[in-house]
Every structure is written in structure tokens, then in C-alpha cells.
Image: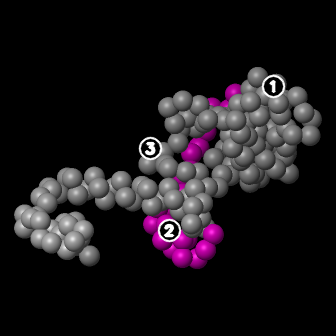
């Protein structure tokens, strides 16, 4: 469908039932006139609402069925960030914090992973780990619980301001 065809279809659907009242009597023959920018705003808001409903688990949930996966597959993308040596010791000296900038067009993160830097330890070098989104309160509690800390297979993501995140792991991260 071309842009002009979409615009024409939008206009037809907008004016389809407008001219009749609840008793099927003609009220007005003047169509509603809106420009291309207003159409774009309406369609963008509709798209955002539809995607939010898919993702938040309304009638259909993101990746719950094959049809919902296919409906949203054009919006799913992969983004990669490298640290460039930005790993610093966290408030807990046993862990390393790495800071990353999230992409501007990001709506939701559905899967996160990171790779450790190349180290002298061959068991750790380049290992893929799962990153778990964590609130600051949960992270504070985890620091005091020896069974909930980041281990060799996972790390924590803390959201900061301005689309920045802090990833806390046991070893420095090469790629997030």
C-alpha cells in the first residue's frame, strides 16, 4: 500500500458513518477535512497503542502466539554497545559496573545479554551471560544476600537517567 492509498483509505473510513445520525437520517454532506500531518498523528498514536497492548499482555501478549510475533517482528531489532574500557569498580569492591547508552528508538527491552572481556582466565574470557533488569532497592538488598549476587552466569541492569544503564557483573564486560 502506498502512502497516498493509505491516506485515501483513512479519509474514507473517517467519513464513512459521519453523515448519519442514530436514526439513519442525513445530517451533513460535508466531509471531515484533516491534513496529512493530522492523519500521521492519529496513525502513530494508534500504532503505539496497538504495540503497547501486544507487549503489556492484553488480549494478545508479545511472543505468546505466532501471529503476535509476526505482527511485531518489524519492530524488533538488536542493539549492541561496547564498553571501551568504561568498567569501574562498583560500590561493592567485588563487582564491576559498566555504563551504557541505550538507543533512542528503544521502546522495551525483551532480552539482554553481555560478554565478558578477554581475561587471563580462559573459563571466563568471552563468556555470554544473562543480564537481569533490577530496581535500585532490589540491588541494595541483593548486595547483602550472598545467594542473590551476580555470579559467573548473570549480571544486574540498573536504569539511570538520560537513557543510561549500569550493568553490574563479577568481571568486566566487553559487549552488552
Taking the magenta stretch, the answer to whether it contains residue 86 is yes
Among the two numbered marks 1 and 3 on one chain, the one whose residue lies closer to the N terminus: 1
Mark 1 Cα within 10 Å, few/some/many (few <14, many 20+)? few
Label 1 with label 3: CB-CB less than 8 Å: no
Q: Position of residue 124 (x, y in %)?
A: 82, 48
Q: On the picture, is 26 further left or further right than 135?
A: left
> 38 or 93, which lies in front?
38
Q: Position of residue 78 (x, y in %)?
A: 54, 57
Mark on residue 24? none
Look at the image and give the residue range highlighted in magenta: 64-88
Q: Position of residue 94 (x, y in %)?
A: 84, 29
Q: Which residue is pictured at 33% across the width and 55% down the height? A: 44
Residue indicated by mark 1: 92
Residue 51 seen in render: yes
Q: Which residue is pictured at 50% across the width and 50% down the height? A: 107
Residue indicated by mark 3: 104
Real-space Cα separation, disc 1 to disc 3, in angstroms: 30 Å
What is the secondary structure assignment of the residue under circle 3? loop
> 122 or 169, which lies in front?
169
89 w.r.t. 8: above or below: above
Real-space Cα separation, disc 2 to disc 1, in angstroms: 40 Å
Mark on residue 73? 2
Amino acid at each position: 500500500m502506498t502512502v497516498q492509498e493509505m491516506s485515501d483509505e483513512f479519509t474514507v473510513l473517517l467519513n464513512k458513518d459521519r453523515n448519519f445520525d442514530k436514526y439513519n437520517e442525513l445530517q451533513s454532506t460535508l466531509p471531515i477535512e484533516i491534513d496529512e500531518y493530522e492523519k500521521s498523528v492519529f496513525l502513530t498514536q494508534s500504532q503505539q497503542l496497538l504495540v503497547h497492548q501486544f507487549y503489556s499482555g492484553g488480549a494478545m501478549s508479545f511472543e505468546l502466539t505466532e501471529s503476535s510475533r509476526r505482527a511485531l517482528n518489524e519492530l524488533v531489532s538488536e542493539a549492541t554497545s561496547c564498553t571501551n574500557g568504561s568498567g569501574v569498580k562498583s560500590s561493592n569492591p567485588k563487582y564491576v559496573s559498566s555504563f551504557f547508552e541505550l538507543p533512542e528508538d528503544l521502546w522495551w527491552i525483551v532480552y539482554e545479554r553481555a560478554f565478558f572481556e578477554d581475561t587471563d582466565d580462559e573459563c571466563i574470557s568471552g563468556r555470554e551471560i544473562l543480564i537481569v533488569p533490577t530496581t535500585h532497592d532490589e540491588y541494595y538488598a541483593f548486595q547483602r544476600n550472598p545467594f542473590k549476587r551476580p555470579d559467573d552466569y548473570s549480571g544486574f541492569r540498573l536504569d539511570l537517567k538520560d537513557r543510561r544503564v549500569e550493568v553490574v557483573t563479577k568481571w568486566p564486560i566487553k559487549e552488552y
